[in-house]
Image: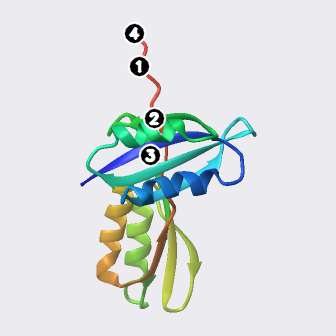
């Protein structure tokens, strides 16, 4: 199966999220990530859905038919600006504290909660960047982690000069 990135512009109405997520469930597709938030228009929201599926043509057509759906776009790899946020807590002892803090600084992660035996970092970036940071911290002992859903916007087409 392949991860597909779908951007869905919807009206801010009750039940829209339930209708869209249940459509995926009825077809047996697992939603890997789902983020919903406001747009520049207060009457609209953008849903970014990452779904594991062999192909999306039929799903995209069905999404377009749903009530309150304004626009559906499948974003091809490389055609979107994608970001996630991750909070990750790692076990630390005094001898490794500065090493972990330096590694985090190099990756652009911020310590947001420092305890006597753990540090929680916040990092935002591409899914690959977050995966790299996660792997970098794994040897130190990750005690907890949470990631936001992926958000994405299609890239602006290049203009001919």
Asked if marks 3 and 2 touch (Cβ < 8 Å), the reply is no
Can you say which quadrant of the picture contains the N terminus?
A: bottom left
Q: Is residue 6 above or below residue 139?
A: above
Q: Say which residue label 1 marks.
A: 158
Q: Quadrant of residue 100?
A: bottom left
Q: In 3D space, how far apart are the residues under numbered discs 4 and 1 (Cα atoms)?
A: 7 Å
In depth, the one of 58 and 136 nearer the eye is 58
Q: Say which residue label 3 marks.
A: 82
In depth, the one of 113 and 36 nearer the eye is 36
Q: Residue furthest top?
A: 161
As helix, strand or loop, the secondary structure at mark 4 comes to: loop
Q: Say which residue label 2 marks.
A: 73
Q: Disc 4 or 3, which lies upstream in sequence?
A: 3
Q: Say left or right for 133 vs 89.
A: left
Q: Disc 2 or 4, which lies upstream in sequence?
A: 2
As helix, strand or loop, the secondary structure at mark 3 comes to: strand
Q: Which mark is residue 18?
A: none
Q: Say left or right for 21 vs 61.
A: right
Q: Disc 1 or 3, which lies upstream in sequence?
A: 3
- The location of residue 108, given as percent across then percent down, is 46, 58
Q: In 3D space, how far apart are the residues under numbered discs 3 and 2 (Cα atoms)?
A: 14 Å
As helix, strand or loop, the secondary structure at mark 1 comes to: loop
Crowd class of label 2 (few under 14; some 14 to 19; many from 20; radius 10 Å)? some
Q: In 3D space, how far apart are the residues under numbered discs 4 and 3 (Cα atoms)?
A: 24 Å
- The location of residue 6, given as percent across then percent down, is 44, 43
Q: Is residue 118 above or below residue 84?
A: below
Asked if marks 4 and 1 touch (Cβ < 8 Å), the reply is yes
- The location of residue 38, given as percent across then percent down, is 67, 45
At 53% from the left and 41% from the top, the residue drawn is 8
Q: Say which residue label 4 marks.
A: 160
At 50% from the left and 71% from the top, the residue drawn is 121
């Amino acid at each position: 199966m392949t991860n597909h990135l779908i951007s869905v512009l919807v009206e801010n109405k009750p039940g829209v999220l339930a209708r869209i997520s249940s459509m995926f469930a009825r077809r047996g597709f697992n939603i890997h990530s789902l983020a919903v938030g406001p747009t520049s228009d207060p009457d609209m929201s953008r849903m970014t859905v990452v779904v594991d599926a062999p192909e999306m043509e039929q799903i995209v057509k069905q999404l377009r038919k749903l009530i309150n759906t304004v626009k559906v776009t499948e974003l091809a790899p490389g055609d979107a600006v994608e970001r996630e946020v991750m909070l990750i807590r790692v076990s630390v002892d005094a001898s490794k504290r500065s090493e972990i803090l330096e590694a985090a600084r190099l990756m652009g992660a911020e310590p947001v909660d420092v305890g006597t035996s753990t540090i929680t970092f916040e990092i935002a970036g591409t899914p690959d960047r977050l995966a790299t940071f996660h792997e970098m911290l794994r040897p130190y002992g990750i005690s907890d982690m949470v990631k936001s859903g992926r958000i994405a916007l299609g890239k602006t087409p290049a203009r001919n000069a």
